[in-house]
């Protein structure tokens, strides 16, 4: 994106500094994210929010702001400056909203960049798994007293298995023959797993698992760490909304315990790492056990399998729909992502059964 565009949008926000340079951060599949360096004491993250996917951007931004406010209230003795290196801090636009909207164009928001932080796409160190578990455990524990009805559903039915299955079933009806053929092995696996993969959804619907504030995009690249592997905080709170903790636990495991990236094509590299599972679970429970129910605890392994399956199904559905949802770089990108996730389920099942 052009320097002038980024600069002028950045200047719509009340950050009291001058733009120096920017770079794009490429890890998201939906929004566009830029790191803006300034001449002041802070740098910033500028994000363009995809309003074709997020239908109520002001509501989404309000969710994020309320969540940060709640997390900050847990540190009553810290100043705003001290808090800004521990919790995401949003910057108001000059019109005093926490977003800027250019008529007929895009929605943007700005956060303070947390200095000296790193993210990981693939985990190569058990300590990262353990620290990552503590970050999510802490996030869920700290939001357990936050009334989730204050948050909007940014994407209704986001992790709802029945809804995702219906979307998949309708993609089967309209898919191109060639794509159906390429996906046939995976279509068979979906029908074999379908029933088991609805267990959590059914428990949720029966009211047996409590609905609370959840993050809903806990892949490991959405956690910030120091350079010496200590957890700082969870980022990308775009999808914070009411949900069940299982999908958060499962989505983190899906990425932490995959020995390869989510779209690695060489499936021999995709294997489930049980050691990292144990480390993540340990950190997670240390921080969140007090706010978890018995039934919640019992279903953590199933949560991992279900979340890998949901992502496999969503990638497969998008492939069958000719790639209308996720950003893709080549024509079989979504199919490769789906294959990768199905391979991970296979490896997960072997390891968990044989442990
Ligand atoms: C999307 O755009 P990003 O990377 O934050 C998706 C998540 C998936 C993830 C897979 C709104 O997140 O649900 O887990 O891709 N977000 C949305 O990498 O669909
Ligand atoms: Mg996200």
Image (cartoon, grey):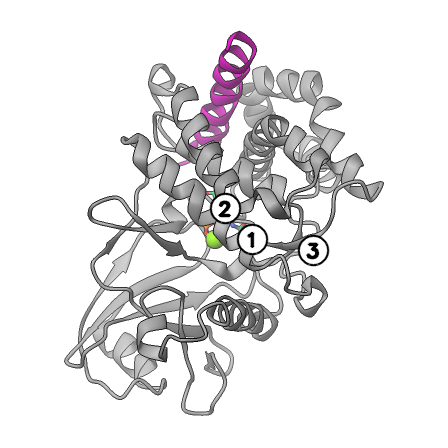
Q: Write down the residue under mark 1.
A: 141
Q: Magenta stretch containing residue 347, yes or no?
A: yes
**Which residue lies most toward the top here?**
354
Percent across and percent down for residue 97 are 50, 85
On residue 156, the disc is 3
* 219 vs 98: above or below: above
Percent across and percent down for residue 284 are 49, 40
* 230 vs 103: above or below: above
Horizontal arrangement in the rendering, residue 15 relative to residue 50 (left or right): left
Q: From the viewer's perspective, is the residue at label 3 or at label 2 nearer?
A: 2
Residue 228 lies in what quarter of the image?
Answer: top left
Question: Label 2, label 1: how many angstroms apart (C-alpha)?
Answer: 7 Å
Highlighted range, magenta: 329-355
Horizontal arrangement in the rendering, residue 39 relative to residue 204 (left or right): left
**Which residue lies most toward the right here?**
206
Q: Is residue 208 visible?
A: yes
* 178 vs 91: above or below: above
On residue 277, the disc is none
Does the magenta stretch mainly form a helix, a strand or a loop?
helix
Asked which secondary structure carries label 1, the reply is helix
Say which of 43 and 168 sits in front: 43
**Which residue lies most toward the bottom here?**
95
Asked which secondary structure carries label 3, the reply is loop
Horizontal arrangement in the rendering, residue 247 relative to residue 195 (left or right): left
Horizontal arrangement in the rendering, residue 134 relative to residue 208 (left or right): left
Name which residue lies at 38% across and 60% down.
32
Disc 3, disc 2: CB below 8 Å? no
**Of callouts 2 and 1, which one flags the residue occurring earlier in the amino acid sequence?**
1
Mark 3 crowd level (few <14, some 14–19, many ≥20, 10 Å Cα):
few
On residue 287, the disc is 2
Name which residue lies at 44% across and 69% down.
75
């Amino acid at each position: 994106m052009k320097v002038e565009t980024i600069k002028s949008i950045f200047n719509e926000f009340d950050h009291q500094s001058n733009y120096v340079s920017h770079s794009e951060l490429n890890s998201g599949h939906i929004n566009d994210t830029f790191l803006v360096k300034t001449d002041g004491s802070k740098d910033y993250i500028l994000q363009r929010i995809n309003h074709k996917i997020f239908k109520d951007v002001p509501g989404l931004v309000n969710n994020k702001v309320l969540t940060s406010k709640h997390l900050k209230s847990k540190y009553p003795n810290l100043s705003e400056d001290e808090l800004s290196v521990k919790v995401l801090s949003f910057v108001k636009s000059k019109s005093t909203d926490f977003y800027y909207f250019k008529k007929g164009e895009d929605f943007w928001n700005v956060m303070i960049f947390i200095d000296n932080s790193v993210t990981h796409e693939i985990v190569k160190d058990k300590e990262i798994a353990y620290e990552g578990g503590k970050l999510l455990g802490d996030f869920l524990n700290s939001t357990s007293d936050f009334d989730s009805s204050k948050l909007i559903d940014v994407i209704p039915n986001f992790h709802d298995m029945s809804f995702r299955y219906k979307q998949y079933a309708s993609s089967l009806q309209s898919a191109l023959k060639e794509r159906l053929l390429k996906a046939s092995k995976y279509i068979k696996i979906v029908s074999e797993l379908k029933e088991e993969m609805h267990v959590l959804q059914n428990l949720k619907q029966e009211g047996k698992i409590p609905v609370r504030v959840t993050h809903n995009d806990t892949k490991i690249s959405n956690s910030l760490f120091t350079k010496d592997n200590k957890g700082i905080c969870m980022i990308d709170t775009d999808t914070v909304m009411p949900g069940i903790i299982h999908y958060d636990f499962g989505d983190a495991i899906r990425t932490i315990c995959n020995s390869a990236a989510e779209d690695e094509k060489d499936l021999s590299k995709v294997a489930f790492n049980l050691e990292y599972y144990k480390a993540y679970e340990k950190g997670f429970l240390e921080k969140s056990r007090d706010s978890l129910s018995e039934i919640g605890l019992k279903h953590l392994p199933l949560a991992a399998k279900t979340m890998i399956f949901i992502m496999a199904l969503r990638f497969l559905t998008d492939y069958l729909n000719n790639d209308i949802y996720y950003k893709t770089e080549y024509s079989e990108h979504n199919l490769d992502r789906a294959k990768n996730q199905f391979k991970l389920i296979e490896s997960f099942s072997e390891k968990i059964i044989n442990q």
